[in-house]
Image (cartoon, grey):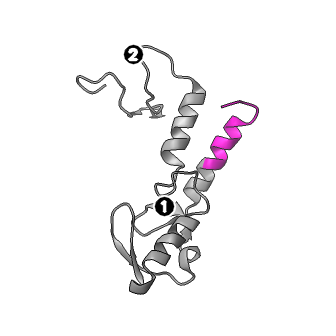
């Protein structure tokens, strides 16, 4: 825990990453469903549309966004033929093929599939 803080920090233990912290009182158990929802919201959500990624595409800066969200950004910056990353503002030239010309970000696709498989038969 951080000094003076009542919520646990995310940390790494010798056996791997610690469970994502959730707003709980000290000593109370964290339900697996809450952790999965928190993980899904924190790591599988596009920072533009705030929905689960739809065909996530990765920029060279390693930030990822939905293909439809990137298409909207491209449309807005079409005249300049360059566009900024919405997170770090690094500027890129338009890729051939628009957003679909960018690399699919399989990390998010695999994480989403894993979370879905964990939720089969559970109401989360």
Give the residue drawn at x 54%, y 49%.
44
On-image quarter of the C terminus? top right
Residue 44 colored magenta? no
Indicate the quadrant where residue 123 lies: top right
Which residue sits at x=58%, y=27%? 32
> CA separation, marks 2 and 1?
34 Å
Label 2–label 1 contact, CB within 8 A: no
SS category of the residue bearing label 1: strand
The residue at which mark 1 appears reads as 64
Highlighted range, magenta: 112-124
Q: Which residue of the protein is positioned furthest toward the left in this rendering?
A: 3
Q: Position of residue 2 (x, y in %)?
A: 27, 27
Mark 2 residue element: loop
Closer to the camera in the image, 13 or 119: 119
Image point (59%, 48%), residue name: 111
Residue 55 in the image: x percent, y percent?
61, 63
* Above or below, comparing residue 53 to residue 73 in the picture: above
Query: Where does label 2 land, which residue?
Result: 26
């Amino acid at each position: 825990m951080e000094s003076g803080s009542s919520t646990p920090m995310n940390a790494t233990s010798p056996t791997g990453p610690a469970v994502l912290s959730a707003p709980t009182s000290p000593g109370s158990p964290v339900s697996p469903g809450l952790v999965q929802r928190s993980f899904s919201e924190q790591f599988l959500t596009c920072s533009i549309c705030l929905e689960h990624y739809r065909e996530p595409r990765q920029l060279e800066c390693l930030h990822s966004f939905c293909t439809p969200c990137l298409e909207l950004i491209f449309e807005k910056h079409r005249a300049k033929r360059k566009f900024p990353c919405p997170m770090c503002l690094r500027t890129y030239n338009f890729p051939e093929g628009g957003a679909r010309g960018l690399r699919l970000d399989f990390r998010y696709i695999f994480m989403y599939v894993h979370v879905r498989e964990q939720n089969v038969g559970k109401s989360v």
